[in-house]
Image (spheres, rainbow, N blue to C red):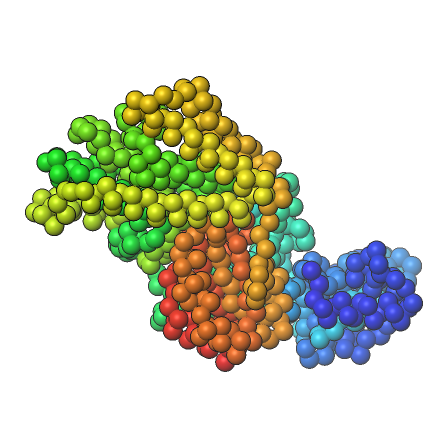
Amino acid sequence: MASWKILLTAAGALLAAGASAADSGWLNAIDRAAAPKEAPNVRVELIAQNKALTPQAKNTLAVVFHHEPGWHTYWRMPGEAGLPTSFSFTTPKGLKAHTPSFPLPERFLTSGLVTYGYGGETIFPFQLDVPRATAFGSRQTVTVNVSFLACKDVCVPGEASASIRLPVAVRPDPGPNAARIEAAERLIPEVVTNEHVTATIEENRLRIDVPPQTGKIAESLTFFPLAADAMDIKVEPVLRRHEDGSSELHLRATDVFAGAPRETLDGLLIADGGPAKGGWAVEVSIPVTRGAVAPLPATAPAQKGVSEAGADSPQGPSLTAWTAVAFALLGGLILNLMPCVFPVLSLKLLQLVEGAKKGEPLLAHGLVFTGGVLTTMLLLSGTLLALRSAGMALGWGFQLQSPWVIALLMLLFAAITLNLAGLFEFTAGSSLGGVAMAKNPKKGLQSSFFTGMLAVIVASPCTAPFMGAALGFAVTQPALEALAVFLALGLGMALPWLLLCLIPGWAAWLPKPGPWMDTFRKIMAVPMALALLWLAWVLSRQVSTAGLLLAVAGVAALGVSLWLFGRRQWGKPASPVLMLGTALIALASVFVIGSGVVSETARHETSGRWAPWSDEAVETALASGRPVFVDFTAAWCVTCQANKVAVLNTDAVTKALDEGNFVTLEGDWTNRDERISEVLARYGRTGVPLYLVYSPSGEVTVLPELLTGDTVVEALRKAAQ
């Protein structure tokens, strides 16, 4: 994507030539319609190391670019925009000029575009072959013609020429420019035959391994690719150094390279800023193999700084494994208070009341409920980590990005709602499982285990305070540490109920049995029905209208099946064929939704002040000098929706957004989106919500998962200053 300034320049060149670029890119338009000319912003000269040329000897000359302040030209691989500088020589018969060597380029960030090039004075050394037959005492003229694109606020295609006339001598003396050329040659990357540096790719994750034998231990390491489609140059490389002196450089490959990796990755490997700053630089061809590559360590692309609202450190708090476990435990405790978990835990409360009424030992219920929570947490986290190792960028709540999972949960929540309403009773013979209270300890324990499992499933859309940072740490760590964090989260969820069962004296605080229990049970059907409606709304954001109607039909068919099942329980006539047929219709609706045939027309549309998020939209807004507020959300994220109602849609926040002239963007993660998954990983999160506030200077503030009006307004006013 070229910037608007570059596009305007190309359009102006086309108008001047009377051509049309309707079917061509801006760079081709410049080549075709804008005749290169001597550019006042770039001056070229030709210099020599010695005062004369010597046949069959090393004759070093150099092309020197003098850029006016603020102007720059481009390297061999210009980056996301620009044109590489090209040289052509005119020499006397027999003499041959070799292609000039390019020194290390600079990295420019202009209007959101990353480019590689040169400013100031830049020297391109080259060798001139002088044959034996060249007469001593003769004078030889060498001319260079240079074509380039010079950019500042606008880009101007240019052409320049320079000549030098030198005598031929047996032993020439060094010329006045000898020191300049020698200094320039020391800055040219050495072309090496690679025997040690290797690269590994997995999906779009690319790792370059540099052994200690390559040179001194590097404090910094960067890579400039020679192919434009090799790596995403917007993403800053991340260096990991090891005690033995070896290093890992983590990069992100482009979709083109990731889809069909080449055998080698060609480019410049630069340590500690290159030779000019005491480091080294080599041009190397790195063999590429497929293998396991850890996710790119969290970093922000092309940013000046990242801070967390309320954090003292600009990079936010760092986590250790023990801190992450503590945060996960605390987050799990708070998760019990989140609205997405309450309907299911109300089932557990009913079970404890009935168990206490029958004199059942509550400790067994508490332990089995905890076992159900931890087992499901292990399964869920193990699946997430396995998919992560397979190269998929996933986060907490990832399973709710699958419409068939939502449809299946709708059937489950519909069954629970009808059960609480008294339409039927779960029994040991029911194919739907033992969810509600049973009449003997064995059935009750089964119910406790299933309730624990269900609590984890419906809790995954919620993100509690402290939980996001802990999970963000977990998915970047080895499996054992990651599982420890997830288990701590599950233990936090189960702990209040386990304590209630461990301390029998607390049972005295439970209400005494009575007719109120049947009324309370029916009341508890209301939040479960609301949860069912919420799931239907989530599904409406993932599938077409036909898909939503199909899910509703499945729920209705299940309702008929369970009504018939309830009639049989109470000894009333009911057709078993119709009961089985409607149950199969309900399950068939899930399979059809899972096939994807009803998902093709599903679209998410933002409304009001919120525009769809993209990296390009952020860059465009910042380039225009406006601050940006980004809300990464999902329809199934209850915390996200609560934050919208309680904070983001309030008059105080809306006023702060208007006064600061903010561009407001919404990144919808309801359906799977790799781009959003990568942003979440970049900021150490595994799920939504994620709120980012960009100032025009490039500073980024990360807001907490659970928002308050004061926190948001303060961050907005700071970014708008």
- Residue nearest the observer in this picture, 479 or 368: 368
- Residue nearest the observer in this picture, 325 or 634: 634
Apparent side of residue 235 relative to residue 527 in the rendered image (left or right): right
Count of numbered labels shown in the rendering: 0
Residue situated furthest front in the rendering: 572
Q: Is residue 585 visible?
A: yes
Residue situated furthest left in the rendering: 505
Residue 89 placement (x, y as % from top left): 85, 62
Apparent side of residue 612 relative to residue 157 in the rendered image (left or right): left
The answer to whether residue 482 is above or below residue 302 is above
Apparent side of residue 261 relative to residue 332 in the rendered image (left or right): right
- Residue nearest the observer in this picture, 699 or 188: 699
Identify which residue is drawn at 42% across, 39% down: 409
- Residue nearest the observer in this picture, 508 or 552: 552
Q: Is residue 270 visible?
A: no
Identify which residue is drawn at 68% across, 53% down: 228
Quadrant location, the N terminus: bottom right
Residue 104 placement (x, y as % from top left): 63, 63
The answer to whether residue 675 is above or below residue 645 is above
Residue 368 placement (x, y as % from top left): 21, 36
Identify which residue is drawn at 46% across, 36% down: 555
Identify which residue is drawn at 51% across, 67% down: 629
The answer to whether residue 474 is above or below residue 405 is below
Residue 243 placement (x, y as % from top left): 38, 52
